[in-house]
Image (cartoon, rainbow, N blue to C red):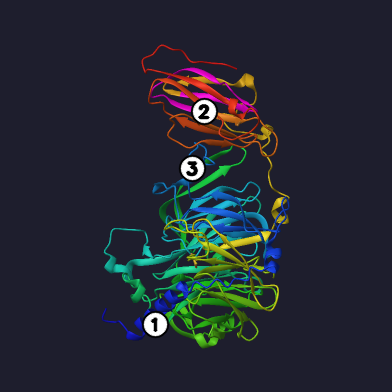
Amino acid sequence: MKHFKVPYLLILITLILVSIIFACNSSKDSASDSDAASKVYVAPGKYDEFYTFMSGGFSGQMSVYGLPSGRLLRVIPVFSQDPEKSWGYSEETRPMLNTSHGFIPWDDAHHPELSQTNGETDGRWIFINGNNVPRIARIDLKTFRTVEIIEIPNSSGNHSSPFTTQNTEYVVAGTRFSVPIPNDDISIEEYKEKFKGTITFIKVDKDKGDMKIAFQILMPGFDYDLSHAGKDKSHGWYFFTCYNAEQANSLKEVNASQNDKDFIAAINWKKAEEFIAAGKGKKFPTSYYHNVYDEKKHSATSTEMKEVLVLNPAECPGLVYYLPTPKSPHGCDVDPTGEFIVGGGKLSTVIPVFSFTKMLAAIKAKNFEKEIEGIPVLNYDKVIAGEVENPGLGPLHTEFDSRGNAYTSMFVSSEVVKWSLKNFKVLDRIPVYYSIGHLSIIGGDTKKPNDKYLLALNKITKDRYLPTGPELSQSAQLIDISGEKMKLLLDFPTIGEPHYAQSIAAEKIVKNSVRFFKLEENQHTYKTLTPNDTKVVREGNKVHVYMISIRSHFTPDKIEGIKVGDEVYFHVTNLEQDWDVPHGFAVMGAQTAELLIMPGETITYKWVPLKAGIVPFYCTDFCSALHQEMQGYIRVSAPNSKVAISWNK
Ligand code: K7E
Ligand code: CUA
């Protein structure tokens, strides 16, 4: 505590007090007049104009809403098990949650990021980061399913992720918590000497979307918080905010708030590619898992990877520069032209806006104030384009419209502030309820923002909805940004903690949406395509049931010869070939979740019977007038019984 400076403590205390005052100011002055209501009204049977994808935060999922109605359309399990969809329970999907730490059915997912082509969202995939066990997932927007999860080695707290480049060349991952690399049993006191950050570049296959770690950059042991890729003129660069340039290893609330400025790291990834091609990457042994779901086999595989290529900036001149950035910056956002880089200094009284053009000139002129571990630190005055003054308290994240305006979320003063990229003057502000984290404009981090709506993603709900006990849902607010003044249109509750959201015109997705899986394309090892092919096969204590479901029966629906302690695998193929006819499957006493089998799909349900007797199973999805009849019986006998396997067709 001996380096402690009083003014910072005062600033912190003031911010906390102001935040409490704002959070408790339960004003109800929303603009929910008939004008606002008509703007969000979507008539029964009509589609919304936009999809919005919200991260689930600590729920590990992603939720999908329609805009402007705020209607919940779907919850997509990502880093989570979902009993409704058997995700993470079925034999086919369990491998998706493998990591170098074993099976991890949870994570803290923050930033959904849509794939882009030419700097615009293209509706093909959406990526999302897992913070706790560093991972990135890819969801296929044809099926709204997670199809790939890659673990990030040499990382911890994967927060500055997975922001994409303008043609989805890369998604990235930065360590929020620096750690020893390779991780090792050393004293935490050795933080300054031994703890490092990494920034990982994950190459995305341009046709298939498959992810592959291309290389990592070894960084000083700061906390890498958020990032965005450059676009247009700054395409080829990535920007990462970081805090804790103090390299504190405890009481970070105070100890990482000492310096006037931390940094934005500017990384030239095209240069990085050249250094890799020139053989500058060092192979580090490591272990991480790459899990891929095959939509034809309806099954996932999990592969352990054992090494990663690492670049050291000290040996790669021109690869990384630091831009000094006021007070523990959080958000790191690039405007649609690629010229301005905005840092969100949580504890700062201004919003710094950097100029990419000035940055290049300062690099050329070597306007460096110092070096940190071989990384030049540029002079603040030489790279700053302007500072937004009196923006409010606690600036976090910024997005943009197409008219040269920026919108910044103010966590502490609970408001959205609109300001101009021409003169950095505040133009408008609107209160939000309460304590906003991210905000999101449709296409707001791309080259082509849409000027209709802004979503405020608020952390504290308090009195906005009917109380539901101690735990309240978090809340989103839809704000009209089409005019000069922002207008609040709608409140709607959200799932988990949606840090960030991204939205896209519905037409980009609807046209590619899969309605069912074609049976003739089903390549599952245990598929069953006709009643005649159904069977029950014993292999030692394993029993494989090849089963089909079609309105309104299972075949077989009478099975005998199962014994206590057997491992029974029901491989159920849904023979329907029409949209919206799933069948469910559940067995009494099975210690797992149901199956929900889409038309044309095969899924496997594992059951180990523990008691002898008659065990019913049934379809859990109300699929037809005779759904209640969609059921069957299994006879379970003692382990030493002589009852032979039999079944009906
Ligand atoms: Cu600001 Cu994780 Cu993007 Cu939360 S983060 S708010
Ligand atoms: Cu099939 Cu109900």
Q: Are marks 2 and 3 in contact (CB under 8 Å)?
A: no
Comparing labels 1 and 2, the label whose residue is closer to the camera: 1
Quadrant of the image containing the N terminus: bottom left
Comparing labels 3 and 1, the label whose residue is closer to the camera: 1
Residue assigned mark 1: 11
Which disc is residue 88 wearing?
A: 3
Residue type highlighted by circle 3: Gly
Based on the picture, tell me whether residue 544 belongs to the magenta stretch.
Answer: yes
Quadrant of the image containing the C terminus: top right
- Overall secondary structure of the magenta stretch? strand
Image-based side of 399 in relation to 452, left or right? left
**382 relative to 469, above or below:** below
- Residue 81 in sight in this render: yes
* First reached walking from the N terminus: tag 2 or tag 3: 3
* First reached walking from the N terminus: tag 3 or tag 1: 1
x then y, percent, for residue 135: 48, 55
Q: Are marks 3 and 1 in contact (CB under 8 Å)?
A: no
**74 relative to 154, above or below:** above
